[in-house]
Amino acid sequence: MSSQKLKIGILGATGIVGQNYIKLLINHPWFDIVDLAASPNSAGKSYEEAVKDKWQMSTNIPEKIKGLIVRDVQDYKNLPSDLDFVFSAVNMPSKDQIKEVELNYAKNDIPVVSNNSAHRSSPDVPMIIGEINHNHTDIIGIQKKLRGLSKGFIVVKPNCSIQSYMTPIYALKEAGYEVNKLIVTTLQAVSGAGYPGVSSLDMIDNIVPYIGSEEEKTENEPLKIFGTIGENGIINSTSIEISATCTRVPVNDGHTACTSIKFKDKIPERDEIIDIWRNFKSLPQKLNLPFAPIQPIIYLDKIDRPQPKKDRDNDKGMAVTVGRLRKDNIFDYKFIGLSHNTIRGAAGGAILNAEILKVKGFFE
Ligand code: NAP
């Protein structure tokens, strides 16, 4: 029954990630969308009117959402009094503005489950991939204490391509095979740049070999995900060195990652690696959470896979699909990982994080 569900809001509801939230959450068993917010340009309009020229989903706007009036993200006076938490996916002129907005919601006793990069490097803000570091929710108490928060807090998810290679690497680490060097080249879809994103003339028949700040995120965020809990938050791991090249390619959805790895000491056989990946399960699977992929890592034997068009939607867009595991002439192995950037890498990944937070009692 809808009345028993948690009441949630979406900040940045009119953007690409916001639209994905609406599509993915409309029938969610635990969460009910009651509030939509975006920029002052959209504020005061019905949702249908606000997105009339930019709705990008393959399904229609759900009937119950069309008539909701969009609120300005910074209009705190008209916040519904009974919001349980918000998902945040806003693009604002500066990261400091996003940081401030998210903190203001937390100060208003509204937990924030974010897609934005603004708080990713704050040590007291957990940055979570559900299958890897769900235990980092343990620092929420530290965050509340340091920032004087009561019911509100901020949790983020990492950059949209990271799970494509870090989940396979984590599965190997869990099995006793630690990777300590990684070279990754990402081929990132245009939807990763939001709407309207990169111009069609720049993108068709082309590859853009640079995405602002993306290589820094790709090299640094995994260190926090593999980090340990200290007195003031997460202490970044020093166990892995990463070198990244990030490119934008003319693909709608689905970020591909060509990855070479070197093991710290023991090197597993190829068949064993594939076996580890195919059998990997973590907390979201054990808890059978609504958005958990049944098999978080799908390994495909076919030599020409994974491909974005054919594999990005595996397990409702929540699985990481991997293929082409082979020997590397310089490192130990190389493989190709793929995941859906706006689902697993954005809205879906954050929904999974919210499900973990709910089960752990953080919204009570
Ligand atoms: P987008 O399509 O450009 O949407 C941006 C959203 O932010 C819109 O709802 C927009 O509202 C709102 N906004 C813009 N300026 C604002 C302002 N001054 N005040 C309040 N709201 C404002 O971007 P997106 O791709 O959805 O990305 C949103 C966030 O998620 C970004 O931080 C991005 O880095 C992150 N992210 C994106 C992806 C991806 O694959 N796209 C993946 C992971 C993380 P209006 O429509 O009213 O302008």
Image (spheres, rainbow, N blue to C red):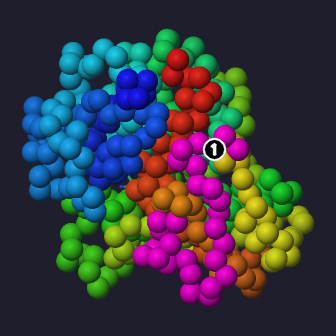
Tell whether 87 sits left or right of 66.
right
Above or below residue 324? Residue 109 is above
Residue 3 falls left or right of residue 334? left
Q: Would you say residue 141 is visible in this rendering? A: yes
Kind of residue at disc 1: Asn
What is the x, y in percent for residue 60?
Answer: 22, 55
Up-down relation of residue 318 to residue 304 (above or below)? above
Q: Nearer the viewer, residue 155 or 320?
A: 320
In this picture, which residue range is highlighted in magenta?
Answer: 286-314
Residue shown at the point (76%, 52%) measured from the top left: 239
Q: Nearer the viewer, residue 34 or 245?
A: 34
**Predominant secondary structure, magenta span:** loop
Q: Residue furthest front?
A: 1
The residue under the point 72% across, 53% down is 281
Instruction: Please count the marks in the image.
Output: 1
Closer-to-camera residue (52/330)? 52
Whether residue 236 can be seen here: no
Disc 1 secondary structure class? loop
Q: Quadrant of the N terminus?
A: top left
Locate residue 48, reporting x and y percent: 14, 45
- In this figure, which residue is indicated by the disc labeled 1? 288
Is residue 14 shown above or below 105?
below
Verify whether residue 302 appears in magenta: yes
Residue at horizontal 28 percent and vertical 41 percent from the top = 12
Residue 336 percent across, percent down from the top left: 60, 75
How crowded is the residue under tag 1: few (<14 C-alpha within 10 Å), some, or many (20+)? Answer: few
Is 194 situated above or below 288?
A: below
Q: Quadrant of residue 231?
A: top right
